C-alpha cells in the first residue's frame, strides 16, 4: 500500500501566496493539505479553504505553535499520515519538488529529509544576507558541538509521522526547525538532505526581511542549539 502523505503549512497573512502554494502541490502524492492560519488579518483562511485545504485556526502567534496544532490535528484524525511534509506559505519553496523531498523516505533510506536551499538554486534576493549567514552559523554550530551535519534549516522538509510524534516537538516559535534537526539526531533518526530551489516570496516578509524578525529568529535559533547541549 502507498504511504499516506500529508502537508502542513503555517501561514500568517499569506492571502496572495497561499493559493499558489496549494495549487502547485502535486495532488496525486498527497492525501490532505492542512493550512494552519496563524491569526491572519487578511483572507488567508478563505483562500486556503477555497483551494481545497483543511484550514485550522491557531490564535496563538508563532511558527512552532502553528506547526504543533497541525500535528495535533493529524494525530487525532481518522487517517494520520505515514509521512508529513512541512513547507512555508509564502511561495518561496517549490511545492512541485515534494516528490523529491519524500523520495528518500519512500526508498526506506531515511526517516527525516531536509530540503536544502544551500544545495539547490536560490533566486537572487530570495534569501537575505542575515538568513544565509544565520543558516551557516546554526548548521556550523550543530556540527561543532554535536557533530550533526546539515547544510540548511530550510522550512521544506519531510518526516515519518511516527518519528515526529516520538521526538515530541515543543518549540513555539522560530526554534522549531532547528529543534527538529537536533532531536532527529538525538533520537538517531536517519536524516538526509535533498537540494531544493528557493524563490522570492510573494507578499510581505515577517521574519528575515525585517530587522526585528531577523534578530528574534536568530536569537531563538542560537538559544535552542545551546539548550540541547
Ligand atoms: N512571522 C510569523 N510567521 C508565521 C507565523 N505563523 C506562521 N508563519 C509563516 O511562517 C512562514 C515563514 O515566514 P516568512 O515571513 O516567510 O519568513 P522567512 O521565510 O524567514 O522570510 P521571508 O520569506 O523573507 O519573509 C510563512 O509561511 C509565514 O506565513 C507567525 O506567527 N509569525
Ligand atoms: Mg519566507
Image (spheres, rainbow, N blue to C red):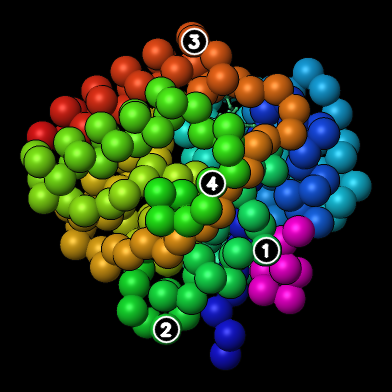
Distance of label 3 from label 4 (alpha carbons): 21 Å
Image quarter for ligand 1 equals top right
Q: Which residue is mark 2?
A: 107
Structural crowding at the residue carrying mark 2, measured as other residues with C-alpha within 10 Å and reported as few (<14), some (14–19) or many (≥20): few
The secondary structure type at the circle numbered 2 is: loop
Magenta stretch holds residue 25: yes
Eye-nearest disc, 4 or 1: 4
The secondary structure type at the circle numbered 4 is: loop
* Residue 27 appears anywhere in the view: yes
Instruction: Tell me the magenta residue range.
Output: 24-31
Mark nearer the N terminus (4 vs 2): 2
Q: Which residue is mark 4?
A: 122
Figure quadrant of residue 162:
bottom left
Say whether marks 1 and 2 touch (CB < 8 Å).
no
Mark nearer the N terminus (1 vs 2): 1
Q: Which residue is mark 1?
A: 96
Distance of label 4 from label 1 (alpha carbons): 16 Å
Q: Which residue is mark 3?
A: 211
Amino acid at each position: 500500500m502507498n504511504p499516506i502523505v500529508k502537508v502542513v503549512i503555517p501561514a500568517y497573512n499569506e492571502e496572495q501566496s497561499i493559493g499558489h502554494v496549494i495549487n502547485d502541490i502535486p495532488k496525486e502524492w498527497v492525501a490532505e493539505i492542512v493550512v494552519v492560519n496563524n491569526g491572519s488579518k487578511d483572507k488567508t483562511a478563505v483562500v486556503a479553504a477555497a483551494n481545497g485545504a483543511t484550514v485550522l485556526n491557531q490564535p496563538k502567534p508563532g511558527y512552532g505553535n502553528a506547526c504543533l496544532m497541525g500535528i495535533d490535528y493529524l494525530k487525532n484524525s481518522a487517517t494520520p499520515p505515514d509521512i508529513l511534509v512541512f513547507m512555508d506559505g509564502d511561495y518561496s519553496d517549490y511545492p512541485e519538488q515534494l516528490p523529491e523531498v519524500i523520495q528518500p523516505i519512500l526508498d526506506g533510506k531515511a526517516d527525516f529529509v531536509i530540503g536544502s536551499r544551500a544545495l539547490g538554486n536560490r533566486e537572487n534576493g530570495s534569501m537575505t544576507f542575515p538568513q544565509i549567514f544565520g543558516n551557516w552559523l546554526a548548521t556550523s554550530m550543530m556540527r561543532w558541538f554535536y557533530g550533526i551535519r546539515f547544510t540548511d534549516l530550510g522550512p521544506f522538509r519531510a518526516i515519518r509521522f511516527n518519528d515526529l510524534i516520538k521526538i515530541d516537538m515543543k518549540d513555539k516559535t522560530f526554534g522549531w526547525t532547528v529543534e527538529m534537526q537536533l532531536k532527529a539526531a538525538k533520537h538517531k533518526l536517519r536524516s538526509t538532505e535533498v537540494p531544493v530551489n528557493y524563490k522570492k516570496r510573494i507578499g510581505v516578509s515577517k521574519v528575515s526581511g525585517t530587522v526585528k524578525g531577523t534578530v528574534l529568529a536568530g536569537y531563538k535559533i542560537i538559544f535552542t542549539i545551546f539548550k540541547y547541549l
